[in-house]
Image (cartoon, coloured by chain):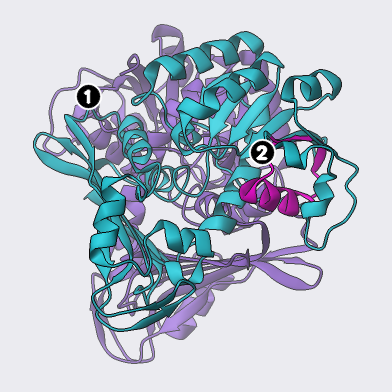
Chain colours: A purple, B cyan
Amino acid sequence: MAGKINLIIYGCGVMGRRIVQALSSKDRFEIVGAVDVDEELAGKDLGNFLDPPKKLGVKIEHDADKLFSEVKADAVVLTTTSYLENIHPQIFQCIEAGLNVISTSEELSFPWKRSPDRAKKIDDLAKEKGVTVVGTGINPGFLMDTLPLVLTGPCLKVDSVRVVRMMNSAQRRIPFQKKVGTGLTRDEFEEKIEKKIITGHVGLLESVYMIADGLGWELEEVRELPPEPAIADRELTTGMGTVKVGDVMGLVSVAFGKKNGEKVINLEFNAHAGVKDEYDEIYIQGEPDIHEKILGGVHGDIGTVAVTINTIVNAVQASPGLKITKDLPPAVVVTQ
Amino acid sequence: MAGKINLIIYGCGVMGRRIVQALSSKDRFEIVGAVDVDEELAGKDLGNFLDPPKKLGVKIEHDADKLFSEVKADAVVLTTTSYLENIHPQIFQCIEAGLNVISTSEELSFPWKRSPDRAKKIDDLAKEKGVTVVGTGINPGFLMDTLPLVLTGPCLKVDSVRVVRMMNSAQRRIPFQKKVGTGLTRDEFEEKIEKKIITGHVGLLESVYMIADGLGWELEEVRELPPEPAIADRELTTGMGTVKVGDVMGLVSVAFGKKNGEKVINLEFNAHAGVKDEYDEIYIQGEPDIHEKILGGVHGDIGTVAVTINTIVNAVQASPGLKITKDLPPAVVVTQ
């Protein structure tokens, strides 16, 4: 086994805590610091949030710059927010401190099309400071972009890529069930779509762009459709209570990319309580066709924690700059 | 698109010709030379072996050193033989000439365990000369090693990996049908196993070792079992003629790796005319379990040609040394 990797946890919310939980059983990593913007967490031991709690000897700091100046680390695991607009100052902060960054920010997974200026600034500064920055997770980062690209490896040509995720939201945590509109009436759902309270799945566009970039395709149109409600045709019991016939079980999000008038990239994300058969499916039309399926699907929360952790080794070893998961060696499970 | 990659084709047999056929439609690559040990091919235009034939303006040479001294290229596509014992002088020849090597040699895919001295020599010289050497193909190289490792990305832990390929050999070329014993009696099959005329699938052991290396596992036992005949329970029509009930339809090859007394890596390669439902399946036991399936399977010949071609870009861009496919960025289809 190569040497230990010293980590700072930036963001001690749900995802950060799950990552800490998973890291705590792995010898390869050492958590040497933690920071959160929430002042109420300041001074608490990070181990308070383990299950069961145990003393880790790592106090949560409020001031990232102060922490970075005091503690020597190899990389930061950054889980504060999905959106580049909000997270980019924190990314710069880490880079300036000479720290590699592995983040669950969906928009960081492929920022070159939607935020080219920010992407370039991150890439330039990372190269200047000799560190790697990468955004990853189960999706974007793996199931709907990197994995489909991996599966084009045995193809001589590819005409189109379609990915379908079928997820039973009733088996996920309550905030997720709420996020997909479980139990709402159709009108309430439409209103939340209009007010952008329900936004669908962050990162679908990034996955479309990442696939197109991997295939060297110039797309003439890339679009994410407003999420559609999945309507119950039978009464369902969920963590959000009973969903009546005609009410919302969850949602379906679709994004696509067009080339020569054809939808050559199609991504469909189904997350509702009516899904009986969970799976993640990839159809590649080409020479040869590839039809791949993960039966039972991949649990999103565990998957994001795992992909993030398993990307750390590659990120630390990669050449400097803003990296896209498809351009790094595969994130293989770190078993120890 | 980045710049053209100039290639020398080393080995103009079945696989070499298929690779040339596929390369001929891609702008990214330029074939600038070809070499074969067969004197009868010397002086012929490589384009004679295209379907339909066309003049490529590339004469097949007999003397590799002479060709290397006369022609400037970025990489060699080496398809002469499966076995490291036979191919290693050619690999050294390419490295000495400062050429990157992408080879379909199964034993080159992971030579560190079965031929550690040769692996080290190749790695050392490649680093000295600043070139990359990589062995790949559909299997080993993709379906039974790199892809299973990619699929551990969403796992927090992995207890075991099982891969099953189900291939209908009756749909493959005649030499392959012959190689798996199609139409033999059981006695004839056993005799050919004993005389090592039928050897099963070259590279299964390399796949076991590659998976173990990717997972950081030390195996206490690694073994490939002698291929078992698949016996016809009904009369079958194949390219080798009619297979009678009780005769051999093809074979099943199995290799495994043990850790703590358990078979933690299991690879099973089924190639016989009785396979109705073709697929390539991966079972990962861990947290979470991953159960993946490529429905219809991946055609082995097309797959090897494609994986080899799609690995060229990575090999040319990689840092010097002997590389294992799992440690390179994914081989994504080169579409142009």
- What residue is drawn where x is 31% and y is 49%? A302
Give residue B183's position: percent from left, percent from top: 36, 70
- What residue is drawn where x is 45% and y is 18%? B118
The stretch drawn in magenta includes residue B13: yes
Q: Is residue A284 left or right of residue A53?
A: right
Q: Secondary structure at mark 1?
A: loop
Instruction: List the residue tagged with mark 2.
Output: B11
Residue A248 is drawn in which quadrant?
bottom left
Marker disc for residue A316: none
Disc 2 marks a residue whose amino acid type is Gly
Q: Secondary structure at mark 2?
A: loop
Extreme residue toward the left, this view: B261
The magenta segment is B10-36
Q: Chain of mark 1?
A: A
Residue A36 is drawn in which quadrant?
top left
Give residue B79's position: percent from left, percent from top: 60, 39
Instruction: List the residue tagged with mark 1.
Output: A45
The quadrant the N terminus of chain B occupies is top right
Give residue A121's position: percent from left, percent from top: 71, 28
